[in-house]
Image (cartoon, helix red, strand yellow):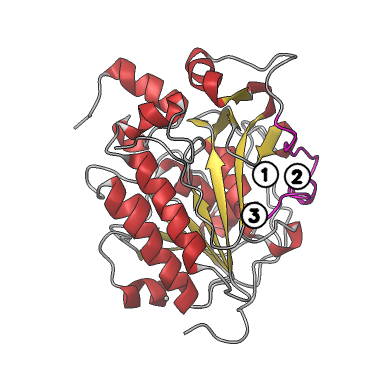
Amino acid sequence: RDMASTASLSFAASLGAPATYRRAVRSRARSRVVRASVEIEPGSDPAPDASPASAQIVVFGSNGKTGARCVQYAARAGIPVTACTRSGSWSPQNINLTSDERSLVTAAAGDVAKASAAELASTLQGAGACIFAASASPSGGSPQDVDKAGLVAVARACIAANVPRLVIVSSGSVSKPLSPVYVFLNFFGGIMRAKIEGEDAVRSLYFKRDGLDYVVVRPGGLTEDEPRGVRSIELNQGDDKSGRISRADVAAICVEAAVAANGCVGGATFECYWADTAKGLDAVGFSNAMGGTSKDGDYVSGRERRGDAWNEIFVGLTADAPGVPQQGVGPSL
């Protein structure tokens, strides 16, 4: 059942609210995913311009709106992908793939809130990367069960299975408990607190893990719009700036961040949003709700990253201080 009114759901969606409320480490890492880079233009269904990768990506939360798009983007780029869902079947709506692309997708059971450590590690065997795109839902589990404990379970399984990189879909504003967006979204079962606690647990787990790393992606308000592509995207670090971005563009970021050739530094955490929607955290919630855009004089952090290609936009990102938590100080549910 819906947990908010229609109006609240619309507002929550504009801020990036949960969609449902509207594996011992070996001495050498397995093969990383080596290439992706396929631009999906609005209204088109292009052939991938990338050679097949040497190792598959495993996506948890693949029936979710963002997870499904991660699977789609990887398959279109010629990357074998395992679509993990609670049911073990992959049947998302509005996801178009050719028969050749669909042949790259293998559905698998992967309930992050219920699967055993051995089951998760088995699913991850041989993977070049893992994307965690699962989040809380009435049928899938609470934020504490999915966004925190589920993420920790998958991270442990990635380490046990020697998966080179774990990419995590989190949320902008998640480390700022006094920000308006955090306060609003956290009313949905304490999801922001669960997400940042999950993030910080991963930072601790990956401390001094040679050959294994993570990347945390913090999207702004999620939309169902067509992807705009890398040139429209801005990355930031510090969790003091956000905006809006389509799920399709977030999926592209996640897959491209998993690709070794793109040079995204391991252990990095960054925010992502369309550059023309960027705002400071004090104003971004209202701006997203009203469809606002950036104007001259809007907040500049000095840590923004732009680029015409993925290897350009990732250049200059810095890794987190090893093992150091990022949960901010302030009241939280």
Pointer 2 residue:
313
Q: Earlier in the sequence, mark 2 or mark 1?
A: 1
Residue 46 — which label?
1
As shown in the figure, which amino acid type bears the numbered disc 3? Ala
Secondary structure at badge 1 equals: loop
Circle 2 residues within 10 Å: few <14, some 14–19, many ≥20: many
Give whichever of 254, 108 is nearer the camera: 254
As shown in the figure, which amino acid type bears the numbered disc 1? Pro
C-alpha distance separating marks 2 and 1? 23 Å
Give whichever of 248, 280 is nearer the camera: 280
Question: Which numbered disc, 2 or 1, marks the residue closer to the eye?
Answer: 2
Q: Percent x, y for residue 124?
A: 46, 72
Residue visible at 64% across and 70% down in the picture: 32
Q: Percent x, y for residue 250?
A: 57, 42
As shown in the figure, which amino acid type bears the numbered disc 2? Ile
- Magenta residues, dominant SS class: loop
In the displayed structure, 239 sits above or below 276; it is: below
Residue visible at 45% across and 78% down in the picture: 160
Circle 1 residues within 10 Å: few <14, some 14–19, many ≥20: some
In the displayed structure, 170 sits above or below 268; it is: above
- Which residue occupies the extreme front position in the image? 329
Circle 3 residues within 10 Å: few <14, some 14–19, many ≥20: many
Residue 108 — which label?
none
Q: Quadrant of residue 115?
A: bottom left
Q: Quadrant of residue 155?
A: bottom left
Pointer 3 residue:
257
Secondary structure at badge 3 equals: helix
